[in-house]
Each structure stands twice: as C-alpha cells, then as structure tokens.
Image (cartoon, grey):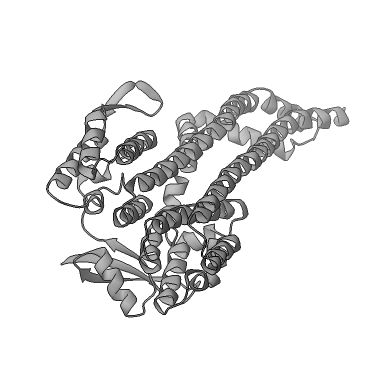
C-alpha cells in the first residue's frame, strides 16, 4: 500500500489540516474520504521522486511537447503512439536560458522515453505521467485524467497547452518588465557610486566649514555608494535574486498552500487567478459534458484542474451536495466567490432549459477572453507602478545633488 497525505478542511474558509493515510491509489483514497463525509482538498503522493522527475524543464519545451501531443491526439493516435512521436521529435540537447549557444541535456528526452515505455507495458497515461510532476503538474494531471475518462484527450492536451502558453507568456512579461528597472538600477548604482566617492563628500566638508549639514538624501546616497563600492558582487547578486524571485514567485505561491487563501484577496493578482480558474473550469466542464460524463464524475475530475486549495475545497463541497441529489448549479450555488456568479447562472440556465453543451463552449470562449484581458490589465498597471518607483529613486538622487548646493547657496 502506498502512503498519501490527505489535505482536509473542516469548514469553509477554515484552516487546512493534513493526515497521512495508506491506499492503493489517490483516487481510491479520495473516494473513501468523500464517503466518510470528509471535505478533501487534496491527496498528495508521498513516494520519493526519482532524480529525473526533479529536473527543471524549460517552459517553452513544455509548450511544444503538449502541442505535439495535442496534434497527435487530434489525428486519432493512441497515447503510446503519440508519446513515441513526441520522444522522437524532442531534441536531446536544449539551449540554457539566456545563453542560446550553450547546449545542456534536455530531461524531456528521457522523460518521454520512460513514459512511452510505461504506456507500452499497459499503464494508463495518468499513471505514467504522475511519475513526472516537473512535466505534468497537478493541473495537467487533472486535465489528463478528465480527458482519459471522457475520451477527449485532444481537448485536454489543448487546455494544458493553453495553460503552459499562458505561463510562458506571463513569465516573458515578468522578465521584459524587469529588464527596464534592472538597467536603470545598474546606471543608478554607477551614478550613486560616483557621487558618493566624488562631489558629495567634498560638499559635505564645505558645508561643515560653514556650519551646515548635508541633507538626508545626500547622506543616504553616500552610505549606499560606500556599500556598492565595498560589495559590488553582493549588489549584483541582489538584483539577480530580485529577478529570480519575480520569475519564480508564481511557482512558490502554488507550492505554499497557506498562501492560497491570502493571494486571492490581493486586488490585482487575486482577480487574475480567479479569472484563470473560472476559464479553466468552464472549458473543462464543457469538454466533459460533451463526452457525456455525469456530474459527480465531472466534479471529481474538475477538482484536479487547479492548484488553488480554496477552489478545490469549493468543488468538494459541490460534490457532496451533488451526491445528495442536487443539480450542478444548485450544488455549486454557494461557491460564487470562487467560480463566479456568471458561471453559476449559466449552469442554472443550461439545466433549466436543457440547452446543449454549445452554450458552455461559448461561455468558455468569453471567459478565456476575460482572462486575456485580465493579463493585459495587469501588465498595464504594473508598468506605471514600476515607473513611479524608479521616478522616486531618480528624485532621491537628484535631491542628493541639488540639496547640498541649495544649502551651500543659503550659507554664503
């Protein structure tokens, strides 16, 4: 029996607690806990990952990989054949970050070979992919499980590819937004160092002769300049660490469940995350309904399409109500804060009128556009904020120069 860590929640908005349990599979354990009326948020596999599963895969390589699987599945190829083609077309070497001429081993080549071998031995794609969370994260696994159960792997791979593309686009935007302030910070460091070792100390001596004193901006500039001059490597490492944190912040938030509830309350970021959750929920639900999957099984599969614990808890609460005979819209009616009032109302209209799944697909298109607009708004707001911060920095440097001159003029 394998060991799992079950994440439970006793009440809505309450703290998450963990419990270690044994079972043959994560789905079996989840169903067992649901039968006991427990609110299961997540079931984590405690097995030790092999070294290959801990290697980092470039986001762009992930996008191309899932694009190949989507194309193969769309042509009607089975999972093993599709994975074999992906393995054959994956390069053994990949460029490393900002050094395109430097080629490093591409772990995706070995991973696709191992998954292909497992599929040939009769394992399901979900079981095979679960060994490599660095390629198939929790969201991708949820979509793959949904695709296998509904017979619509092409649509599932398309959704995973869209999510990977969004992650890559957001990452690129974070990097592009960071480039400008990094350049300004580098230039500012040179200017501050020159001021701190040249004119400002001389002005300080002149003001001291006239019984004056340097303003605080000048004193701060001198101290910062001394620090940069004494520890230039540390300064460069600090800038590099800031860029790294900006790029890796989304992954850190995902891996830290206690932050999930708080991050949804941040005005701009929380809205962006909820827009992504709602778009993925409606898109996947439309795919499942199109494949005639019943509501209870759909809810079980829908829980796995997001890393966000408040969302997963909301779906579990909806599952418990749907298991008691309530319709999907009624079962999810109290979760509008997560799923959105518009989503609930559309589900209610579909159930009351017997509308076909095409309405859900149209709603998914609308919500995907909303998500794209939310990403655009986030970028639009972030740029002026960065400019304001940099303007404040430049203002301090300017006042550090002109402040002593004005004070000297008043003393003469």
Q: Quadrant of the C terminus?
A: top right
Q: Quadrant of the N terminus?
A: bottom left
Residue 404 percent coordinates (x, y): 77, 30
**Compared to 117, does 328 lie above or below?**
below
Nearest the viewer among 166 and 254 is 166
Q: How many numbered discs? A: 0
* 92 horizontally vs 228: left or right: left
> Would residue 306 be seen by someone viewing this image from the given angle?
no
* 136 horizontally vs 388: left or right: left
> Would residue 62 be seen by someone viewing this image from the given angle?
yes
Residue 292 percent coordinates (x, y): 37, 60
**Residue at x 78% of width, y 32% of height:** 403
Q: Quadrant of residue 51 in the image?
A: top left
- Farthest residue to the left: give it: 121
Q: Quadrant of residue 382 in the image?
A: top right
**Compared to 373, does 197 lie above or below?**
above
**Residue at x 33% of width, y 52% of height:** 147
- Farthest residue to the top: give it: 101
Residue 26 percent coordinates (x, y): 26, 64
Nearest the viewer among 200 and 164 is 164
Nearest the viewer among 303 and 55 is 303
**Residue at x 38% of width, y 69% of height:** 296
Nearest the viewer among 385 and 326 is 326
Residue 191 percent coordinates (x, y): 63, 25
**Compared to 322, does 102 lie above or below?**
above
* 115 horizontally vs 371: left or right: left
**Compared to 225, does 50 lie above or below?**
below
């Amino acid at each position: 029996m394998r060991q799992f860590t079950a994440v439970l929640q006793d009440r809505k908005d309450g703290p998450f607690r963990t419990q270690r349990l044994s079972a043959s599979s994560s789905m079996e354990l989840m169903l067992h806990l649901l039968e006991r009326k427990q609110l299961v948020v997540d079931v984590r596999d405690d097995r030790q990952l092999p070294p290959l599963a801990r290697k980092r895969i470039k986001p762009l390589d992930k996008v191309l990989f899932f694009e190949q699987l989507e194309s193969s599945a769309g042509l009607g190829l089975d999972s093993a054949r599709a994975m074999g083609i992906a393995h054959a077309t994956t390069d053994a070497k990949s460029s490393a970050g900002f050094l395109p001429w430097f080629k490093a081993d591409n772990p995706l080549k070995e991973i696709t070979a191992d998954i292909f071998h497992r599929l040939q031995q009769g394992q399901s794609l979900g079981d095979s992919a679960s060994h490599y969370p660095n390629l198939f994260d929790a969201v991708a696994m949820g979509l793959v499980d949904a695709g296998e159960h509904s017979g619509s792997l092409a649509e599932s791979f398309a959704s995973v590819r869209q999510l990977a593309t969004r992650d890559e686009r957001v990452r690129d935007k974070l990097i592009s937004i960071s480039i400008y302030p990094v350049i300004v910070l580098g230039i500012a460091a040179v200017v501050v160092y020159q001021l701190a070792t040249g004119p400002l100390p001389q002005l300080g001596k002149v003001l001291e002769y006239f019984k004056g004193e340097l303003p605080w901006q000048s004193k701060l500039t001198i101290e910062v300049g001394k620090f940069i001059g004494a520890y230039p490597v540390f300064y460069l490492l600090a800038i590099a660490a800031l860029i790294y944190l900006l790029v890796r912040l989304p992954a850190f938030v995902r891996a830290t469940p206690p932050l999930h509830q708080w991050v949804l309350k941040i005005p701009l970021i929380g809205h962006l995350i909820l827009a992504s959750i709602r778009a993925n929920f409606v898109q996947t639900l439309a795919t499942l309904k199109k494949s005639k999957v019943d509501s209870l099984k759909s809810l079980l599969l829908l829980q796995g399409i997001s890393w966000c614990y408040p969302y997963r808890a909301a779906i579990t609460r909806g599952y418990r109500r749907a298991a008691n005979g309530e319709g999907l819209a009624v079962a999810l009616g109290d979760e509008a804060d997560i799923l959105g009032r518009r989503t609930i109302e559309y589900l209610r209209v579909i159930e009351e009128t017997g509308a076909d799944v095409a309405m859900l697909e149209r709603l998914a298109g609308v919500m995907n556009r909303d998500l794209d607009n939310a990403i655009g708004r986030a970028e639009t707001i972030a740029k002026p904020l960065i400019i304001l911060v940099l303007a404040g920095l430049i203002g301090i440097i300017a006042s550090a120069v002109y402040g002593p001159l004005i004070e000297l003029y008043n003393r003469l």
